[in-house]
Image (tube, helix red, strand yellow):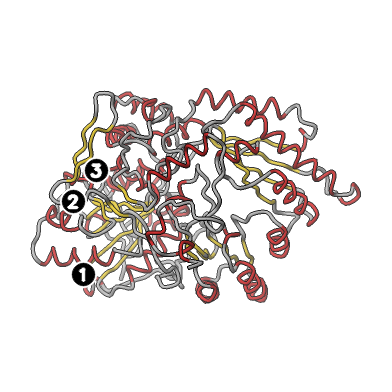
Amino acid sequence: MRKLALSDEILMSVDKSARYIGHEVNAVWKDLDSVDIRFCMCFPDVYEVGMSHIGIQILYEMFNRRPDTFCERVYSPWPDLDKIMREKNIPLFALESQDPIKNFDFLGITLQYEMCYTNVLQILELSQIPLMAKDRSWEHPIVIGGGPCTYNPEPLADFFDIIYIGEGETVYDQLLDLYKECRKNNDSRHEFLVKASHIEGLYMPSLYEVEYNEDGTLASFTPVEGAPEKVKRQVVADMSEVVYPDKPIVPYIKAIQDRVALEIQRGCIRGCRFCQAGMIYRPIRERSLEFLEKYAIAMINSTGYEEITLCSLSSSDYTKLAELMEFLIEEMGRRRINISLPSLRIDAFSVDVMKRVQDVHKSSVTFAPEAGTQRMRDIINKGLDEETILKGARQAYEAGWNKVKLYFMLGQPFEEDSDVEGIPHLADSIAMEYYDTVPKEKRQGRCQVTISTSYFVPKPFTPFQWAAQITPEEYTRRKTLLMDTLKQEHNYKSIKYNWHDSQTSILEGLLARGDRRVGRVILEAYKLGCIFDAWTDFFDAKKWYKAIENAGIDMDFYTTRERSTDELLPWDYIDTGITKKFLKREYEKASRAEVTKNCRDACAGCGCNTWNTGVCVENK
């Protein structure tokens, strides 16, 4: 019988003990004597957040379909249990078997957000695995990183044995097969890593030497022992012919996303110049309607969830969205299952669909103009004009909504004060649409327009990867300018303004575009007690700035410095399929506020047609 790793006394003393006991509905169990490989998937955040991530559910399903492999899960212990485990020397354990992670063959950590990096070190230390990859032997698991942050893994290079670049459904089988062969042949750990470096998409940080120029820029990045000069991103060619969980795990406690998640496509056609996800998941590839209908019913039947949501960067661009929605509205309506619709472009079809599946009196409609003026929207290649925005608001008001959320970014390249002032001007125009559209006798009080601004962080593999990030002081000035302008608007009382914290965003910028030297900052921050930095309650900017000082790192060098487009960047060894020539061209077009058409209207020559899949071959 499975024994819990924590005593009843400990479980009774910590918050939400159900985070740590496993054995949830649809969790997998295998006879340990029947498997050759034990793999633990980790989301370096609290259980409720990690259980909302569809990527881990996909890999969990994929690994456990192998008869020779048992895949389990682990999440970051909340600070209350973290303290107890350190005091009592309890090693971190997997949920399914409750066995210590240190006894596994692999520990796979998904890297979704830079501010979770110190939690990676928490996971390693609580697991009693050496923090530095160079200090590990066969007595320790192979530590693998995956996810969107791996498109610049250099700040974490010293802590990982392997970095998986791209989509996880492609070459993991090759890696696991190689592992079994190397262990059978008594190869050393290093020999295994050298051989694994020849599997496409796998990056071994220990097999690359880095040198720097006197000015601190990167001078060279050299592979050794036969490692490839370029690591090629892995792409799933056919999204309807890969593993997807028909029986996702159902947590005991409410997760952040407490519903069935149906990924309808991967990638995006829009080409927004600020958006890393839109670039690194190119080209857009759709799942078939038959696939989605099958899995929607299977997941609802196997979980008992009362809501289903569509997952996509831009759901409106799914070519069979109308047919899918008709199916879901009929099928889920019959079952009394709610439908959640994120990422829809606001148009007549979207408003009609939302009205059919949402309570307009409880929900709000969301626009993401990202910028307040047409000039700025052209700079970022948003593909959205003011008339379209106002028309969408008008249609939403006519359908019964009176609450609108607007998302913007401050500090994008080439932004001027007039662009900042354009944000409240646009919000005022959207509020005015309500009063012009809805007769007084039909209004439910004032409309509510909520502006939210984030502090722009340039990311690798976007046209803005060379741009300077504005300083926190400049972000505050622009935020103040926005607020002062807002107070002068006619519909000021109908508009609310929220903003994102500047301290986490500037640190995110450091971690997003840092090189290997930035790993010292992460280690110092962790030693100073930084964990759960993505949580406002735990984030401590003073500790981070102390860590930067201790590490001898120049913050401005990584954040507020504009790079030359000829500079060797820490992530240039990664081949995403998107050419540097294309990104440079887009950066130059941004400086002239020139628009690039979306992928379905015209090919922009980004380089992704080399994958020979998705939108690149739709019309061939």
The numbered mark, 2 or 1, whose residue comes first in the sequence reads 1
Local SS, label 1:
loop
Instruction: Give the image location of residue 93, x and y in percent.
Output: 30, 56
Please, what is the three-letter code of the amino acid marked with disc 1? Asp
Q: Is residue 95 left or right of residue 486?
A: left
- C-alpha span from label 3 to label 2: 23 Å
Q: Which residue is mark 1?
A: 36
Q: Is residue 183 above or below residue 368?
A: below
Q: Secondary structure at mark 2?
A: loop
User: Which residue position is annotated with label 2?
Assistant: 227
In the image, 132 versus 19, the foreground residue is 132
Query: In which quadrant is the N terminus drawn?
Result: bottom left
Residue in view at x 56 percent, y 68 percent: 305
Query: Which numbered mark, 3 or 2, is in the foreground of this view?
Result: 2
Residue 593 x, y percent position in the rendering: 57, 37
Residue 10 seen by the camera: no
How far is mark 3 from mark 1, CA to CA? 25 Å
Q: Are marks 3 and 2 in contact (CB under 8 Å)?
A: no
Looking at the rendered structure, the number of numbered marks drawn on it comes to 3
Give whichever of discs 3 and 2 has the lower sequence position.
3
Vertical position of residue 69 compared to residue 453: above or below: below
Q: Nearer the viewer, residue 374 or 150?
A: 374
Q: Is residue 550 above or below residue 228?
A: above
Relative to 260, say whether 365 is above or below: above
Q: Quadrant of residue 495?
A: top right
Badge 3 is on which residue?
Answer: 131
